[in-house]
Amino acid sequence: MPVSRVEPALEARLMKALAHPIRLRALMVLNERVASPSEIAQELDESLGVVSYHVRMLEELGCIELVRTTPRRGAIEHHYRALERPWLTDDQLERIPPSLRRTLSGSVFAQLAEDVSAASKTEGLGEVRHWMVRFPVLLDEHAWEELGGLLQGILDRALELQVETIERRVESADGETLTAILGLMLFERHVPEHDRAGRAAKRGERRSSPSPARTREPRRPSR
C-alpha cells in the first residue's frame, strides 16, 4: 500500500471513512472529479439515499468538501471534491483487523475491474501504448520491501506528473489530455497447503541432484 505520513487524528478519520466499501468507492470517484451524490449513485449503481448518507459521512469526517450547489427540478444538488486520498499506509493497515484490510483491497480491485471492463469496450485497450502485465515472481522479505518501495516511487511520480500536466494545460490548451487509470498491485499468491508440501519436496529433490546448465536467458514478460 502507498506510504505517507498522516497525523493521528486524520488517520482515525481516514480509517472510518474507508471502513465501508461505498464510502471508499465514493471517495475514489471524488478523487477523479467533482461530483454530486446523484452522479456518484448512478456510477456505483447504488440508491441515492444510501450514497447520500455515505457522502455526508465523508464530509463530516473532513475527507471531502462542498464546492458548489446547483438548482435542479425544485431541489438543490450538492457537488463535492476530495480532500484526502483513498488509501492507508502500511503502518495504518497493521492497526486494523484483517477483515477490514480484505474489504479495502476488495473494493479497490472491484473498482479496477470495472475500469478495465469499461476500457475493453472502447479503443482504450487496443492502444499499443497501454500497459497490462501479470507476472508471478519469487521474492524474499528484502526483495518484497524493495519492490514495494519501487511501486511507491511510481505512485509518487504519477501524482507529480498529474500536477505538471495541469500546470501545462493552464499555460496552454494545445495538445491532448488523456484520462488514464494506474493500477498497482503486489500481493502474496495463494498456494494450497498440499501444493506447498509438494513444491517443498521437489525443491529438496533438486538440491540433492545436480542441475543441468542453463544456456538461455529468461524471457521478458510481454507488454
Image (tube, helix red, strand yellow):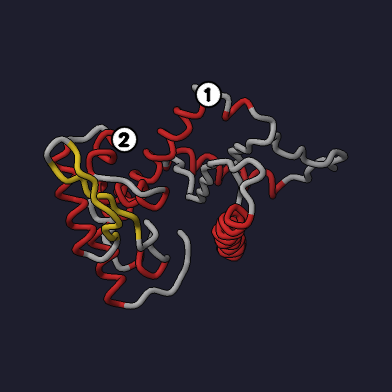
Note whether 202 is above or below 147 in the view shown: above
Image location (x, y in percent) of residue 83: 35, 62
Q: Which residue sits at x=51%, y=51%?
A: 186
Q: Residue at x 28, y 54 (%)?
A: 68
Which residue bears the numbered disc 1?
Answer: 122
User: Could you tell me if the residues under marks 1 and 2 are in contact, i.e. CB atoms within 8 Å?
Assistant: no
* Residue 32, label in figure: none
Q: Nearer the viewer, residue 197 or 157?
A: 157
* Element type at mark 1: loop
Q: How many marks?
A: 2
* Vertical order, 147 against 180 (above or below): below
In the rendered image, the residue lying farthest to the top is: 121
Q: State the quadrant of the C terminus.
A: top right
Q: From where the camera sits, is residue 148 visible?
A: no
Q: Quadrant of residue 13?
A: bottom left
For the question of whether residue 85 can be seen, the reply is yes
Q: Position of residue 55 (x, y in %)?
A: 21, 51
Neighbourhood count class around disc 1 (C-alpha, 10 Å): few under 14, some 14–19, many 20 upward: few
Three-letter code for the amino acid on which mark 2 is drawn: Glu
Which residue is at the front of the view, 37 or 197? Answer: 37
Q: Nearer the viewer, residue 107 or 64?
A: 64
| Residue at image location 74% in from the left, 40% down from the top | 220
The answer to which of marks 1 and 2 sits earlier in the sequence is: 2
- Disc 2 designates what residue? 43
Amino acid on which disc 1 is placed: Thr
- The image position of residue 31, as x and y in percent, is 39, 52
Mark 1 → mark 2, Cα distance in angstroms: 18 Å
Task: Please state if 141 lies on the left or on the right of 38 as rendered.
Answer: right
Q: Secondary structure at mark 2?
A: helix
Residue 159 or residue 66, whichever sits in front? 66
- Which residue lies at the image location 77% right of the left edge and 40% below the top edge? 218
> Badge 2: how crowded within 10 Å, few (<14), some, or many (20+)?
few
